Image (cartoon, coloured by chain):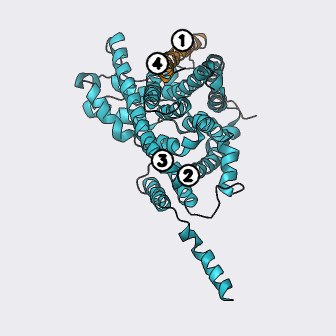
Amino acid sequence: MIDAITGGLNGLVAGFVHLHWSNPIMILVGLLLLYLGIKKGFEPLLLVPIGFGAILVNIPLAGLMDEGGFLRVIYDAGVMTEIFPLLIFVGIGAMTDFGPLLENPKIFLLGAAGQFGIFLTLALALALGFTKLEAVSIGIIGACDGPTAIYVTSQYAPHLLGAVSVAAYSYMSLVPVFQPPIMKLLTTKEERMINMGTVKKSVSKTTKIIFPLVVTVVAGLIAPRGLPLLGTIMLGNLMRECGVVERLTKASENEIANIVTLLLGISIGATMDGRVFLTYQTLIILALGLLAICLDTVCGVLFGKLMNIVTRGKINPLIGAAGISAYPMAARVVQKEGQKYNRQNYLLMHAMGANTGGQVGSVIAAAIMLSVINGMGII
Amino acid sequence: MDNLTFGISIIVVGMGGTLLTLWILSIFMVLLKRIFPYKEENEGNKER
């Protein structure tokens, strides 16, 4: 009788007994993510489920990420198979208007410059001793694009998925904080005041419909390893622009995207088990991720300056900062910064063009990176 | 392949490849705009 009661009581304290020192710290990290999402409004759709997932997985003996555990089932079904990021891409494509980009195709190049941080950070990660595939996954944080980072990391360095995805999503939300000082540092007051005029509506519906098809075929042929990413975002955009599958478009940008975002967020949070997550390596990844996004901004603005010279002062270099994929935050930052120096300056639509270029650019950069390392025989 | 060779190669091919691909796509965009110029179009497609 006494033994039975003692055994029963032991069962009630087992959770506390098995608490690893790292678990309470990660529960606090989960609470911090919840705070940032709920109170500060930083990417709440993701930080709330990620934060809660982090809390769940750090409560011992619940077995949520053990074989058959409910988070494990979701993780295996959606993250390891890459289905979740791809479904989110259909939704992103359905939400994105490439009109401002098509109005001024040359600013597409800013979307390429805004990805250079990926490759520079990859090289730095290699120098710091990460393996090639780990470096690829760390560099991809510079895409400033959560689904792309998750897609690449889940394939090539799944043990880094928690750190990479938290870095990708949290830094995306911090774009308004770290971009303005870089933009100010790299441009003169005269450059920031350049008025690019208004964007005229000059793109036909046919062009908008054919655009996603051209991107899929051309970029798919150049970098076939990234076709799932390209194909899904362009499918979503084709559905949006053709206008004949409104129900599918709405489902992609609402119901499907919402359900997948919830499941993806909680799955990522579930990778943040303190015993695996709290390492020196994680801190390095977080630092490299921040550097990657800063380098993207630097390269984007510098490329904007180059385009300003080539076009004889017609391009405001600030829009180069919108060449990263954080849509539409980066474009809003450019608009706000531009108006600080010239109240008559409306850079928003130009920046939106660069920003959508950055969205396509980030996917193409990832696709090219995968195809290049495949060509080198690394994967 | 050692890390240095890999790092330099991926910077050159990756950055160059991304820039080149987007440049090619921007040319296609210009061509598309010329072939299908903007005009007031009937946007009244109905859902099938």
Callouts 3 and 1 on one subunit: no
Q: In the rendering, at what x and y percent does residue B22 appear?
A: 52, 18
Drawn side of residue A111 relative to residue A75, left or right? left
Which tint is chain B?
A: orange
Tell me the crowding category of disc 2: few under 14, some 14 to 19, or many 20 or more residues within 10 angstroms, Cα based. many
Badge 2 marks a residue whose secondary structure is helix
Looking at the colours in the rendered structure, which chain would you say is drawn in cyan? A
User: Alpha carbon of mark 2 to alpha carbon of mark 4: how far?
Assistant: 34 Å
User: Alpha carbon of mark 3 to alpha carbon of mark 4: how far?
Assistant: 35 Å
Tell me the crowding category of disc 4: few under 14, some 14 to 19, or many 20 or more residues within 10 angstroms, Cα based. some
User: Alpha carbon of mark 1 to alpha carbon of mark 2: how far?
Assistant: 42 Å
Q: In the rendering, at what x and y percent does residue A209 appear?
A: 64, 23
Chain of residue at mark 2? A
What residue is pinned by disc 1? B27
The amino acid marked with disc number 3 is Glu
What residue is pinned by disc 2? A269
Could you say which is closer to the camera, residue A61 or residue A41? A61
Callouts 4 and 1 on one subunit: yes
Badge 3 marks a residue whose secondary structure is loop
Tell me the crowding category of disc 3: few under 14, some 14 to 19, or many 20 or more residues within 10 angstroms, Cα based. some
Going from the N terminus, do you reach mark 4 or mark 1 first?
4
Badge 4 marks a residue whose secondary structure is helix
Chain of residue at mark 3? A
What residue is pinned by disc 3? A43
